Amino acid sequence: MRTSTTITQNEVDAYAKFCAEHNIINDGTQADIDNSNLVLDYFTKTWNEDITEANLAQAFPQLKPLLKFQSQAEIELRKTAADSDAVATQKFATWFEKQTFLVKEGEEIVAE
């Protein structure tokens, strides 16, 4: 049962950590908004539980097919960008969302 009618900072923090650990898009883009709304609805309407690390782990198998993930290219590029300063990282994030030659979501599988 939920302990609060609003989303708490602890829930926000648990969700952010969960996204980082699972390469779930959580960057202010439309994909992030879609992910956040999906998780919010799942926990507040479907499951009626608090968003905690344990509950996120338990719900992950049901949510995984519906969530949008960072591509492997984005993961590697963001790691490189994170090693630089904050301004460069923000410029990279803005560029990445506008570029059209790298996969932005999920994993692209190439059959041989």
Image (tube, rainbow, N blue to C red):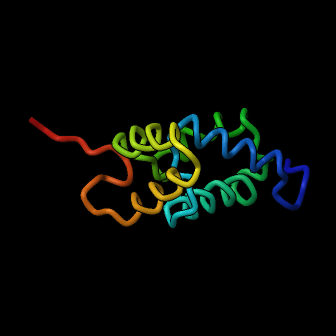
Pick whichever, 58 or 32, lies toward us: 32
Instruction: Decide which of 97, 43 is in the foreground and name it.
Output: 97
Q: Quadrant of residue 34?
A: bottom right
- Residue 76's place in the image compared with 86, above or below, is above
Using the image, determine if residue 44 lies above or below residue 69: below
Give the x, y percent position of residue 15.
Answer: 68, 45
Relative side of 74 to 2, left or right: left
Going 56% across and 45% down the picture, which residue do you hit?
85
Answer above or below: position of 110 versus 44.
above
Q: Residue at x 53, y 56 (%)?
A: 90
x, y percent for residue 95: 40, 61
- The residue positioned farthest toward the left in the image shown: 112
Q: Is residue 99 above or below residue 15?
A: below
Question: What residue is shown at x 88% (from left), y 61% (from top)?
Answer: 5
Residue closest to the eye, 71 or 53? 71
Residue furthest out toward the right: 3
Callout count: 0
The C terminus is located in which quarter? top left
> As rendered, which of 98 and 90 lies closer to the eye?
90
Residue 98 horizontal side relative to residue 64, left or right: left
Q: Give coordinates of residue 40: x percent, y percent.
A: 69, 58
